[in-house]
Amino acid sequence: MRIILASTSPRRADLLRESGVNYQVVKPEVEEWVAADFPEMAPGDLARGNAMLKAKEVAGRYPKKPVLAADTLVACESRILGKPANERGAKEMLGWLSGRTHEVITAVIFILPQGKKLREAVVRTRVKFRELSEESISSYLREVEVMDKAGAYALQDGGDQLVEWVEGSRSNVIGLPMEIVLPWCEEWGEEV
């Protein structure tokens, strides 16, 4: 039986497809929380809250299907970076990350049919950026569409131009920690 992916992220869909998971994409109809509205909230809690909003909204529409939702953000020092609003914002984010180590935080929620069980996890991966010049940032932004990506970059799309090293789950940086998600999907398949 297929799962419902409560996300329109092509990267999450690619990760599931490459892992052989049968899924259907459903766009969550929610207004996501933003860090500016919840300055006291820890990054992992913010990501978890957004993932839960998405999962519950879609599970309400598809109560007989398992639902997988996720939310990814980037935390660097005291800043939480979501998706850039425009190219200027993307340049600012990449400039801020230049030469710094940051965390990519993805919260994942998996709700079984009829809400029988819920699995959740918050996965953190440390990423160190190279020192970036203004020209290298502009060049990257010309080559890669980043407006739908937390932190304004994609590890799988030219990330080697930006990233010096990754410590932890690479798939988490792409948007879905498959070492967590795949066992949940396999367990669900065994329960059917």
Image (spheres, rainbow, N blue to C red):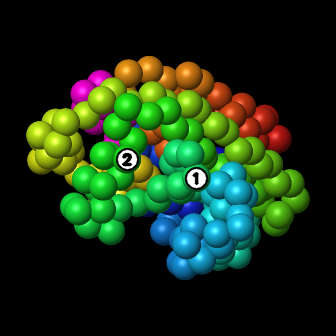
Whether label 1 touches label 2, CB < 8 Å: no
Residue placed furthest toward the right: 116
Q: Please tell me which residue lies in front, 109 or 133.
A: 133
For mark 2, does the 10 Å Cα neighbourhood hold few (<14), some (14 to 19), or many (20 or more) residues?
A: some
Label 2 belongs to which residue?
Answer: 96
For mark 1, does the 10 Å Cα neighbourhood hold few (<14), some (14 to 19), or many (20 or more) residues?
A: few
At label 2, the amino acid type is Trp
Q: Magenta residues: mostly which secondary structure?
A: loop
Residue range of the region highlighted in magenta in the rendering: 153-162
Q: Is residue 142 left or right of residue 87?
A: left
Q: How many marks?
A: 2
Q: Is residue 17 above or below residue 41?
A: above
Q: Is residue 122 above or below residue 52?
A: above
Q: Can residue 16 be seen in the rendering of this structure? A: no
Q: Is residue 159 above or below residue 94?
A: above
Q: Can residue 90 be seen in the rendering of this structure? A: yes
Tell me the element at label 1: loop
In x, y percent, where is residue 13? Answer: 44, 46
Residue at image location 49% in from the left, 32% down from the top? 101
At label 1, the amino acid type is Ser
Residue at image location 55% in from the left, 72% down from the top? 36
Residue at image location 77% in from the left, 55% down from the top? 112
In x, y percent, where is residue 53? Answer: 67, 70
In x, y percent, where is residue 67? Answer: 66, 58
Q: Is residue 70 left or right of residue 111?
A: left
Quadrant occupied by the C terminus: top right
Label 1 belongs to which residue?
Answer: 78
Tell me the element at label 2: helix
